[in-house]
Image: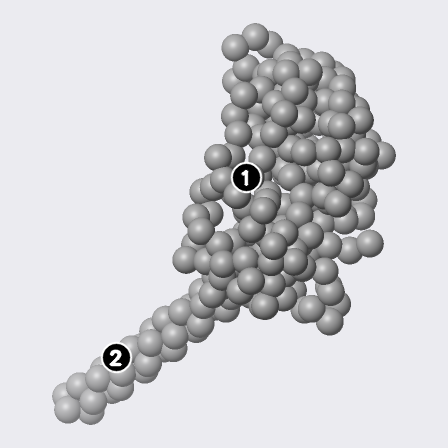
Amino acid sequence: MARNTRSGRGRWRALAAALLLALGLAGYGWWWLQHWAPDPGRFRMQGVEVGAGDGQVDWPALKAIGARFVWLDASVGASGIDPDFVRNLDDARTAGLLVGAVHRYDPCQPAERQAANFVTLVPRDPALLPPAIDLATLADNCPVHVSDGAVESELMTFINQIEMHTGKAAVLKLSPGFARRYGAVTRFDRKLWLSRTVLEPAYAGRRWALWTANPARSTEASENPLRWTVAQP
């Protein structure tokens, strides 16, 4: 009886030790993911995407930890704007970072109205990085039905109009869902910005130029996690 009791206690101790080890590994894995960024030896150009929802950013500190660029959320659809865009643009430039602007595209709204919203907010400045178009929203919930072909056609109109304003070819920031639904967009002759945590993305079927590698990286540059992004030529 005593031998069985000791054996049972031994099994419980082993189980408790295994559980503590698993919890420790899980905690380390969580911490590692929160702070992970791609190897700067392989990806020399690293930076972030920042919007009003990310709170205050210490731009000099961001540059000090290795960021060289920032794409700022600027406009949304036909009328939305990021209220912090102008201030962030000035502050990021003062810190010596390269700066670009992002428009979140809404397939339910006319391309011309969206382009007018973007060009009203974003200056025509050759020093800016190419404009980026955030393509994540699908047309499934539009008040009026919008066909896949119409989405692709209107998007091309929007691209042409903001490129006339900026003088630079746009970058398409494609979500996996948008790429699956509107496959023709992946074949547009524009550079792609893809997203996947830790592992390089391949869902667009061709090479990416920008990669959101850690969508919630903790850094000393902000109290909130930042969307850490790398670039390749």
Q: Which residue is mark 2?
A: 12
Q: How does the figure colour the protein chain or chains?
A: one colour
- Measured as percent of width and height from the top left, residue 193 is found at 70, 44
Amino acid type of the residue tagged 2 in the rendering: Trp
- Mark 1 nearby-residue class (10 Å; few <14, some 14–19, many ≥20): many
| Vertical placement of residue 62 versus 112, above or below | below
Residue at the farthest right position: 189
| Vertical placement of residue 164 versus 190, above or below | above
Q: Is residue 64 visible?
A: yes
| Vertical placement of residue 200 versus 161, above or below | below
Amino acid type of the residue tagged 1 in the rendering: Phe
The reply to whether callout 1 and callout 2 are in contact (CB within 8 Å) is no
Q: Is residue 148 visible?
A: no
Q: Which residue corresponds to the image point at 52% horizontal and 43% vertical from the top-left?
A: 87
The residues bearing labels 1 and 2 have C-alpha atoms spaced at a distance of 57 Å
Q: Which residue corresponds to the image point at 61% horizontal and 29% vertical from the top-left?
A: 121
- Mark 2 nearby-residue class (10 Å; few <14, some 14–19, many ≥20): few
Q: Which residue is mark 1?
A: 85
* Towards the viewer: 143 or 94: 94
Which of the two discs, 1 and 2, labels the residue nearer the N terminus?
Answer: 2
Residue 66: assigned label: none
Q: Which residue corresponds to the image point at 39% horizontal and 74% vertical from the top-left?
A: 24
Give the side of residue 37 with respect to residue 28, left or right. right
- Measured as percent of width and height from the top left, residue 138 is found at 59, 25
Give the side of residue 59 with respect to residue 208, left or right. left
* Towards the viewer: 205 or 82: 82
- Measured as percent of width and height from the top left, residue 168 is found at 80, 36
Q: Secondary structure at mark 1?
A: helix
When asked about the image quadrant of residue 160, the answer is top right
